[in-house]
């Protein structure tokens, strides 16, 4: 226990601290922007980001992952805030947390194993595109100074690590923010700063119980939003955890992460914040800046509050161009460039799943819809592929009075029709033996297909023998097949 705690918290103090500083600075404009998207005061997003980051540092299942207010969640809140106000949003945030805790105890994170690698790749690429698109408003209709500052920021980010000694010890995104802020202050150029995004809070968050009536009507208002927030939040968190797992080559506890996200959202709602989840962009910034442990997440959350409450005058002077450069770096680093090269090598079905996930996610700006469509497509392609792995051959025996059918492969809903059409019911033989020793029956549809085959043969006066069923197939066939039940067969045949 002590060794695990030391590893998660204190094995990388310098790297985690510096990475946390970078993340805290990058969180400020994003939290303000997401608050604006949701239609609430900027302090709602900032308080949420502080609260969620601090709580998840202790309760989360993925060390080094950053959670805060996110754009995907903000988009789901717009209608609720517009029609019912902030108090209902806070209530919905509390219910979201409860649902996520329940999901953690039900171990729903195990469902992530049904998300194929092509869907994850599509999700990552779509998110990279959305992160880049979110920076475009800051690069549209601006003076040349903004482009010059952004280009300079990218140059610092990518070239600073090559400097001897200091290049590897100080995160280049932090250097970018400090240098560009100094340039802005010394030059006095007219460009947008963090202060132009919205008023920063000047007080610490306080305990707030949502001022809503505790009635069933309130529950029915917030429940649909809470369900969607819980699903999207967990989906993005699980995806982000998988990506950070790959980046750091370390495992994570997904079910603990579900519970941690729920506890963090309850804390956020009670301190006047909106619901949030893991942030892939900020998590990548954290990892790329050297963050690996829980300390980086805690530093990011605590420093965020200190910056916006006690150092807001200084923070407001940070040019947006510096933060845009950092987010463009995140976008470039997040995108799976290998997936473009792999388009030539991977099967068409894999490419279709990946590209469709990207297209739907970018088109709807909804990560849940994109992943759902990707998973659905992947499942359909897989079922079709497995359904085609079915061979049925036959041979005559006993001087033409008996025919033996050999079934090889998987029989389920996608291959049941092919199974049923492989038999010759008009052939005049006394007995048919169906050898199922190399076949497997998976579902009710497969059993019904077997029923139809046996009943059709018997209707033609042919004796049918089934041999070789494995134990699993025999169990489902014995439980659900009706071909040996005269009454059920008569009912199936319509009484004829």
Image: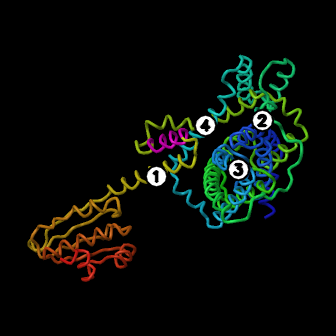
Callouts 4 and 3 close, C-beta under 8 Å: no
Upstream in sequence: badge 4 or badge 3: 4
The span from disc 2 to disc 1 (Cα, nearest Å) is 40 Å
Check disc 2 and report the residue beneath it: 171
The span from disc 4 to disc 3 (Cα, nearest Å) is 17 Å
Q: Which of 345 and 46 is in front in this view?
A: 46
Check disc 4 and report the residue beneath it: 130
- Quadrant of the rendered image containing residue 33: top right
The span from disc 2 to disc 4 (Cα, nearest Å) is 24 Å
Upstream in sequence: badge 4 or badge 1: 4
Element at badge 1? helix
Whole-percent x and y of residue 202? Answer: 89, 42
Callouts 2 and 4 close, C-beta under 8 Å: no
Write the start and end of the magenta stretch as one range: 351-363
Query: Within 10 Å of the Cα at label 4, are there few (<14), some (14-19), or many (20+) other Cα atoms?
Result: some
Check disc 1 and report the residue beneath it: 376
Q: Nearer the viewer, residue 198 or 312?
A: 198
Task: Name the side, left or right, on which 153 lies relative to 109.
Answer: right
SS majority, magenta: helix
Does the magenta-highlighted stretch encompass residue 167?
no
The span from disc 2 to disc 3 (Cα, nearest Å) is 26 Å
Does the magenta-highlighted stretch encompass residue 362?
yes
Callouts 2 and 1 close, C-beta under 8 Å: no
């Amino acid at each position: 226990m002590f060794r695990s705690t030391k590893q998660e918290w204190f094995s990388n103090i310098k790297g985690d601290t510096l990475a946390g500083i970078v993340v805290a600075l990058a969180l400020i404009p994003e939290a303000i922007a997401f608050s604006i998207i949701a239609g609430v005061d900027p302090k709602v997003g900032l308080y949420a980001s502080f609260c969620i980051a601090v709580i998840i540092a202790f309760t989360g299942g993925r060390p080094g992952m950053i959670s805060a207010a996110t754009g995907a969640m903000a988009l789901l809140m717009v209608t609720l805030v517009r029609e019912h106000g902030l108090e209902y949003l806070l209530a919905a945030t509390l219910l979201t947390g409860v649902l996520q805790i329940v999901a953690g105890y039900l171990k729903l994170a195990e469902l992530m194993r049904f998300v194929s690698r092509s869907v994850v790749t599509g999700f990552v690429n779509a998110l990279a595109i959305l992160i880049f698109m979110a920076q475009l408003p800051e690069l549209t209709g601006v003076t040349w100074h903004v482009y010059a500052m952004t280009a300079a920021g990218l140059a610092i980010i990518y070239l600073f690590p090559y400097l001897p000694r200091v290049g590897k010890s100080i995160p280049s995104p932090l250097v970018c923010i400090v240098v560009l802020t100094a340039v802005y202050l010394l030059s006095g150029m007219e460009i947008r700063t963090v202060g132009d995004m919205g008023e920063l809070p000047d007080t610490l968050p306080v305990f707030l119980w949502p001022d809503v009536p505790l009635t069933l009507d309130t529950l029915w208002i917030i429940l649909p939003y809470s369900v969607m927030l819980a699903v999207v939040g967990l989906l993005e968190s699980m995806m982000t955890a998988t990506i950070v797992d790959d980046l750091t080559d370390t495992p994570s506890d997904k079910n603990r992460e579900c519970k941690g996200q729920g506890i963090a959202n309850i804390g956020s709602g009670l301190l006047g914040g909106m619901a949030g989840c893991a942030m892939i962009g900020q998590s990548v910034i954290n990892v790329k800046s050297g963050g690996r442990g829980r300390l980086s997440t805690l530093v990011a959350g605590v420093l965020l509050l200190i910056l916006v409450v006690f150092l807001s005058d200084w923070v407001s002077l940070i040019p947006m161009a510096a933060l845009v450069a950092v987010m463009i770096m995140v976008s470039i680093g997040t995108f799976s460039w290998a997936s473009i090269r792999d388009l030539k090598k991977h099967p068409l079905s894999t490419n279709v799943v990946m590209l469709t996930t990207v297209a739907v996610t970018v088109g709807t700006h909804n990560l849940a819809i994109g992943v759902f469509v990707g998973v659905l497509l992947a499942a359909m392609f897989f079922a079709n592929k497995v359904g085609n792995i079915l061979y049925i051959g036959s041979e005559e025996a006993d001087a033409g009075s008996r025919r033996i059918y050999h079934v090889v492969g998987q029989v389920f809903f996608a291959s049941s029709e092919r199974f049923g059409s492989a038999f010759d019911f008009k052939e005049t033989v006394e007995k048919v033996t169906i050898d199922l020793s190399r076949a497997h029956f998976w579902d009710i549809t497969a059993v019904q297909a077997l029923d139809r085959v046996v009943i059709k043969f018997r209707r033609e006066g042919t004796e049918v023998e089934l041999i070789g069923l494995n134990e699993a197939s025999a169990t489902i066939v014995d439980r659900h097949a009706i071909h040996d039940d005269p009454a059920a067969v008569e009912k199936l045949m319509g009484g004829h």
